[in-house]
Amino acid sequence: MLRDDLMSALYDMETMSKVFDIEPFDLYLLGGSGCIIAGYLDRATRDFDIIDMEYSSRLGRVLKLLEPYDIIDTNMATIALSFKERAVRIEGFEHLGIYVLSREDIVVSKLGRYGEQDVLDIKAMMPDCEADVLLRLVGEVLDRADLIEKAKVVFRKNTMLMLKDFDINVPDYLQ
């Protein structure tokens, strides 16, 4: 889906939320769909990546309009838990709060996997990222007590690769 398609699905969800008399709620997007909606990237994607905000089952009726979608469990994902502080609100929605994580937060989230598409996305976003913010968020992820150790090991390895790929000095806590 392109940006217009993604936005259309979000507007449809907002309309149906009103029709079904669902209380307003916030939606935090990341991944390719979030990047496209926020204007960080210009490419197509197939799905929405939504951070799990412990949504009620009642929202299933309207979230269905975003299919296919993935609900990202923060306990399993390499996300700095302070993401809301930097999230960008998408204008044009009156009933729902639609947010996209900051570039730096999305880059950090992509380091959990660092696959081919992740590397391409990071490469496109890095010129507009603040390295000090990025490194601070890496530290936040590594300091998370709730993140499983295996995920931290993979995250640390991928972070080292990314820092080398983008010629960023490796901070002491990663060495």
Image (cartoon, helix red, strand yellow):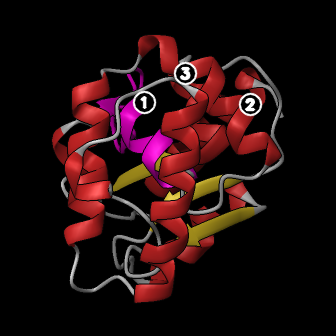
* Mark 1 residue crowding within 10 angstroms, few (<14) / some (14–19) / many (20+): many
The residue that mark 2 highlights is: 120
Marks 2/1 in contact by CB < 8 Å: the verdict is no
Residue 92 location, x and y as percent?
42, 21
Residue drawn 28% across the image and 67% down it:
142
Disc 2 crowd, CA 10 A, few/some/many (<14, 14-19, 20+): few
Query: Total number of numbered labels?
Result: 3
Rendered location of residue 147, percent (x, y): 35, 82
> What amino acid is found at the position of numbered circle 3 in the picture?
Met
Cα separation, mark 3 vs mark 1, equals 7 Å
Q: Report the side of 153 relative to 82 (left or right).
A: right
Q: Quadrant of residue 5?
A: top right
- Residue 99 visible somewhere in the drawing: no
Residue at the spot 22% in from the left edge and 36% down from the top edge: 86
Image x and y of residue 118, in percent: 69, 43
Which residue does the numbered mark 3 point to in the structure image?
125
User: Looking at numbered disc 1 in the image, what kind of residue is underneath it?
Assistant: Arg
Does residue 14 show up?
yes
Label 3 neighbour load within 10 Å: few <14, some 14-19, many 20+:
some
Disc nearer the start of the sequence (2/1): 1
| Mark earlier in primary sequence (2, 3) | 2
Residue placed most toward the observer, 150 or 75:
150
The circle drawn on residue 167 is none
Camera-near label (2 vs 1) is 2
What residue sits right under mark 1 in the picture?
103
Q: Earlier in the sequence, mark 3 or mark 1?
A: 1
Report the magenta residues as a range. Answer: 88-110
Instruction: Determine the residue positioned at 57% across, 50% down.
Output: 110
Which of the image's four quarters has the N terminus?
top right
